[in-house]
Amino acid sequence: MGASASREKFRESVTALIEVDVSPDDADFWDELWKIPSSADEVFELISPDAARRLRDERFDNLATLFTQATAQLCQIVETPYNIYFDQALNCVRVLTRILPFLLEKGDLGDPDPNVEHLCWGTGANPIPSETLPPPEDKIMGLVIGGNTNDVGEESAYRKKGSRSNSVDDDDIETVEEDDNQEPLALLVVHAAMHMLFLPQFTCDFYEEEEEDDLSTLDSRYSKRTNGTKNSEEGLSNAEIMRKRRDEQRAAKEDREMKNEAGLGLTKHADTGVSLSPRPTSIVWAAGCGVLPSQLGYDANTRKYDKNRVELLRLLLASCCDPLFSPADEYNPLASRWLAVAVAADAPNAICLFYSLLNTILSYDPNGLGVPYSNTFASDTHIRLVELSAQVLCVLLDCGLPGNPESVANDNGDPIVEFDEASKGGFNIFRTLLARLDSSKELTFIYKGFVRLLKNVYESKNTYLPNSLAKLECFQELLVLLWKLLEENPLFMNHLLTQCDVNEIIVPICFLMYQSRRDPARIGLVHICTFVLLKLSGERSFGVNLNKPFKTKLPCDMPLFSGSHSDLISITLHKLVVNGAYKLVPLYSCFITIICNISPYWKSMSLVSAVKLVNLFELFSSPKFLYSGESAHRHLALLLEVFNNVIQYQYNGNQHLVYAIIRRKDSFGRLVSLTLAKAISQCSKVYGDKRTVQYDADKDKTDIVSTSSIDERGNPIDDRRSRSSGRRRGGNSVVSDQESTISGDAATIDTGGDETMTTTTGSSIVGDHFQPTEEWIADLKATLPLETVTRLLQHLVPVVDEMCARKNGVVDEVEILEVLKDVTMVGLLPVPHAIVIRKYQPNQYTALWFTAFMWGVIFLRNQNLPIFDGQAIELFQVSVAPGDDD
């Protein structure tokens, strides 16, 4: 049958399913349907969204038969993986990928439908038509697909080299016979997809699966490990062997120290539990975390299985899309049974899948051979595999409960999770695996992977030859994955800040923020970059590391400066305030909080940064901003804290900032002398009787992201009391900060509820405008820590004025900077205040925002082959630009 004939035949079959009732017993129709060679593009084109919904709403029996037969065929191919059935299995995979999202529109988190509920989760005696069931002799079907819940996490041991064994133990037969109910089709689909991701000759090479643990197996594994160590030392001299062993001992010691610093302590021991080791390691797709190159069963560079892996990852993504159909304000990360099945402890090959996805992403090198245009020889399919791996891994890490990072091992030293923990509701084996990554080598591999991939966002544009370097498009998914690691794995944060150069990650983040500041479609990207910077800025090591000189040339219009990575961050954030989209207004507090957190460690501020920070102070102290809302002055308080931190703790080397403050002394003087009469007069000049405000600071107060203040010893502190007491008696203040919150708006992604900003660039906020009062003036005076800057100006302004008078006003700025550099301020400034660090504090709105943002990215990135239709999506708003055809 030719391509056009098969396409037409498939079209006729789809039309028949929509127009007439087709009996499940019509073997000729169904057999022919599954054997028609159809590409993924044809399946998605011929089963349109309208056709899929008509099939669901008008011919549900046909849809049920289609779903059950496709599922049964996948179960059969897992049971008997013969090459001759692979094309037919791919047809089933494509059809399921197409229809599953439309079923889930009526699923757990969508608009419930009893028919869909019964089809997906019914456990009747025989929900699958008898014609599609495997032969009766395949009695281990229930164990292979769906797993044995009595052996949580132990994967089936029945796959032998190239085929299945037809023999089963008596105990297994009894288990099957005792289970009168067929497992739900939803569970069968998810488990079949996870099995097929590691199916011999389909998605991996032949392999021999390890048997379940018993004493002989443990002894054998220990013997292999010991022999492997000996074999690795063969051919080495005694000196090389001793050096290798010393390196291993040193690495083990560093790992223990790293765990102690993170408060994880010693490894706990347990007799039994769910193994967290990938078995067999030979089937993992790429080396890296959990798997060494020597442990792979095939060439890690092979691409022969990429197409089939892409098809199955699409199916897994389609089966986990429940969150798309939940309204944002009602979303529950524990409510989806489809996701719960995929991340359960007994999910087939879950551990191998985790390491395969993670290593496939982080081992990819977009630079290829390092030769211009070498990307033209790269496989588009492999790039698509990397992108889908990132999306699927993010989805699997976004549900359930956080993993426990405390390591547990059995008597053999293998990592496990105890059965009690694995059986709890909300357990997510993928989050547990992510939290348990604890080897320095693995964490370094992860860091290098992120650096290599994220640097591509500017390196691909920074070439002499146009388009000579491949551009990676999945950087937003990478940022979500980076966030998950920072949140879930305490060792990764510590390793990143103490053992790696965190600036390698900061540069691409700042570049993305700078380039995306005016793009409405990338407001969400700016949000996630801000979250990462805010979380990192809460650590002292981060601020210290930022003093490394910045020498990278970025392909953007950023002003030239000679300074450090602290300057890069401040210049970037300044640009986002003065030249960013209006929807970035809710992030202003976060921007200044980031600068405030790093300011005590900022050794030498560049002239560009100094001028821009003082310009920000002028902007936020202008009547337009100061009187835009009752809480508008908190931006000024944070900026003054930046100045105070630099003056008190890093005066030497920061004469540029001191000089910039002197030049703008009137801005500070106006705040010091502000009275109620002046405030009312200035407010009237700006706003008059109008009730229209371009910027309303009170809109910047919804609890999507919050920070809590601590001192350097980790004690909680209250900002307002710390400022007032710090001015009176210096440093040992103790306070709590509940400020610095942002909205969760992400441009085209609206999380719903009252937590969003729905205004657009240049729009106005209409309502009763704020009016200054005596109480507000008193609160402003108490909140703004002006004393340090005032003392500085009182001493240095006369010095500069005298110098100018001596030279008749003709003074080189370099001379002034030299004078300021040599001036000592000891005894002239107030007693140094306590350093206040504002740490990121997660809350329910943050998690919801990340879910909405992540799924919004996935939705937009899957439009070439549109897995999801925007018509029924509730998690965020889908807007089609005028002129778009789809």
Image (cartoon, rainbow, N blue to C red):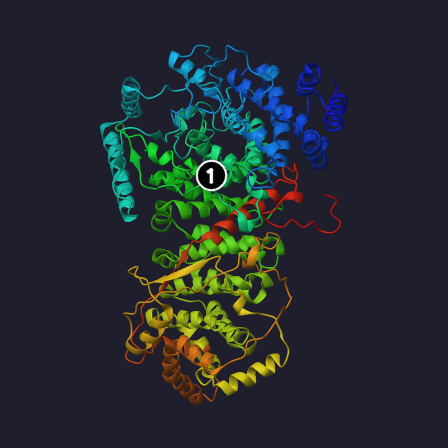
The residue shown at (34%, 50%) is 498
- Viewer-proximal residue among 647 and 376: 647
Looking at the rendering, which quadrant does residue 709 occupy? bottom left
393 versus 462 height, above or below: above
Give the image quarter of residue 359.
top left
For the C terminus, the image quarter is: top right
Residue 858 at x, y percent in the picture? 58, 42
Q: How many marks?
A: 1
Q: Position of residue 519 (x, y in %)?
A: 62, 56
Q: Is residue 794 above or below residue 126?
A: below
In the rendered image, the quadrant that contains the N terminus is top right
Amino acid type at mark 1? Leu
Residue drawn at the location 48% of the way across and 62% of the way down:
591
| Secondary element at image label 1 | helix
Q: Is residue 449 above or below residue 20?
A: below
Residue nearest the observer in this picture, 885 or 664: 885
Q: Position of residue 22 (x, y in %)?
A: 71, 22
Tell me if 319 is positioned left or right of 599 in this view.
right
Q: Residue at x 46, y 52 (%)?
A: 844
Is residue 472 at least partly visible in the picture? no
Instruction: Mark 1: give few (<14), some (14-19) or many (20+) Cα within 10 Å.
Output: many
Which quarter of the figure has residue 721? bottom left
In percent of width and height, residue 234 lies at 29, 23
Looking at this view, is 193 or 365 the one in front?
193
Residue underneath mark 1: 362
Q: Is residue 686 visible?
A: yes
